[in-house]
Amino acid sequence: MRHSVRLRTLTSRAVLAGVAVALLSVLVTAMVAAPLAARAAERQARDSLRTQAGIMGELLRSRLQSPRTVDEQRLVAQWRTLGIDAYLIRGGRADRPGLPAALVSRVAGGQAFSGKRLVGGRMALVEGRPLGNGNGVVLARHLATGFWRQVLGAMGLPLTAGLAAGVLAGTLLGRRLARPIRHAAGAANRLRAGERGVRLNVEPPQEVADLAFSLNALAAALEVSEGRQREFLLSVSHELRTPLTAIRGYAEALADGVVEGDAAVRAGETVLGQAQQLERLVTDLLALARLDAVEFALAPMEVDLSGLVRDAAQAWAPRCAAEGVELRVEAPAGVVRAFTDPGRTRQILDGLLDNALRVVPAGAPVVLCARSPAILEIRDGGPGLSDADLAVAFDKGALNRRYQGVRPVGSGLGLALVAGLARRLNGHIEAGHAPEGGARFTVALPLPDPNTRRTNPWPGATTVVPDAEEERR
């Protein structure tokens, strides 16, 4: 089991791959080099045998004219120790069997021979030298006797060295390739354990550098995200604690009988107002949570933004009048078409209007605008936003933290909720400076498309598309 686990590592697999490549290279090299080495060895053996045949012929030229002597027998025995069989031909006959008759006749007839023949039933290199008067000498060296041993001996050391080098290279390469991955895995485990200062050295090759860069970017993003989450939780905790403190204080006063008569009524109104503030905060939190849910329901249809703006203005006119704010509508007489969910789009308008009325002083304007192509815009004459504010306007709690105690603020979730709704509607929202002197929020929505009206253009949302009869109603 332990061996199988080890074979799953990149290092072990790289080593095995290196060994396999080295072994394959050795086999291919052997297949290519062995015939070349064999031919070279054969040529060397033939040259050596030719030289020795000439020497032996000169030694025995005069002696073959007389009967066989002891010296000849010693000379033949000495050649045999070298792996060479020596045959002496006298008067056209070999001194012992084994040579082909045609070869004996050829040498006895005065013709030299150099080549391969069957000698004693085995293939051998043969060199024959005629010595005149039907005499001659023939030397034979069998190919199987030491020949392939010589070839393999010459090739064995280089091939073994190549195989060892392949194993070593595979091991070093495997460890080199696995090292950055091991470091990345260790860094990921440290990130999982909660450490956020983890960083990897960015080093070549490019793939390893990309991995290190991505992991560093992930660590930085986690650090920023968790920092924002902590800030957001602190902000929400503060927003929750303020009304809860007021509710608890008045509740204790009522319970102890300290507050009576008209004061009790005012205390009850205060508790009710604080409870409503808590309810708004919890509602915003739930809405933000639902924005990222897969089952977030949408009902897209073709909508007239001009009519939507006028309806919103009619609904908000009493509150604007009560606060002394001038509400203006800028919309063309014709239809401004968009393909959107009217309820969710109205929720965006309500959120932006509520945000504007919170800070716009009496006498200043709030402008509700609709224009082509599928654009909604809300501008106000309030204190506005700085360039630094615009960069974080839609971050949860960012403006709330900046202006707490400076100007009226809400839960810190309203603009984040509006931005999330625009995103889920496949639209886009941006913040800027208004010509009226305050803030400007512009929402761009999708245009109607006959080819996609009956499909779900917003991945991740549960889309309810009304049929034609429902649209007419």
Image (spheres, rainbow, N blue to C red):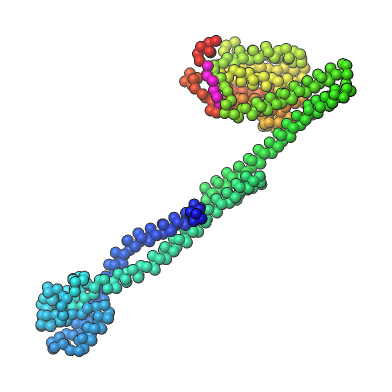
The image shows residue 296 at horizontal and vertical percentages of 59, 25
Which one is in front, 41 or 272?
272
With 22 as the anchor, is 341 left or right in this view?
right
Picture quarter with the C terminus? top right
Q: Nearer the viewer, residue 431 or 208?
A: 208
Which quadrant holds residue 155?
A: bottom left
Query: What range is drawn magenta here?
Result: 461-466
Q: Specify whether residue 298 is in view.
A: yes
Q: Nearer the viewer, residue 189 or 176?
A: 189
- Above or below, 394 against 302 in this view is below
Q: Is residue 8 magenta?
A: no
Residue at x 76%, y 13% (from the top left corner): 322
Q: Position of residue 134 (x, y in %)?
A: 10, 81
Q: Position of residue 230 (x, y in %)?
A: 70, 37
Measuring from the top left, give residue 235's x and y in whole percent: 74, 32
User: Residue 465 lies in magenta, yes or no?
Assistant: yes
Q: Of residues 92 and 290, which is closer to you in this image?
A: 290
Q: Residue at x 61, y 12 (%)?
A: 307
Please name the residue shown 12% across and 78% down the image: 108
Quarter assignment of residue 360: top right
User: What residue appears at the point 68 percent right and 17 percent down from the top-left corner?
Assistant: 367
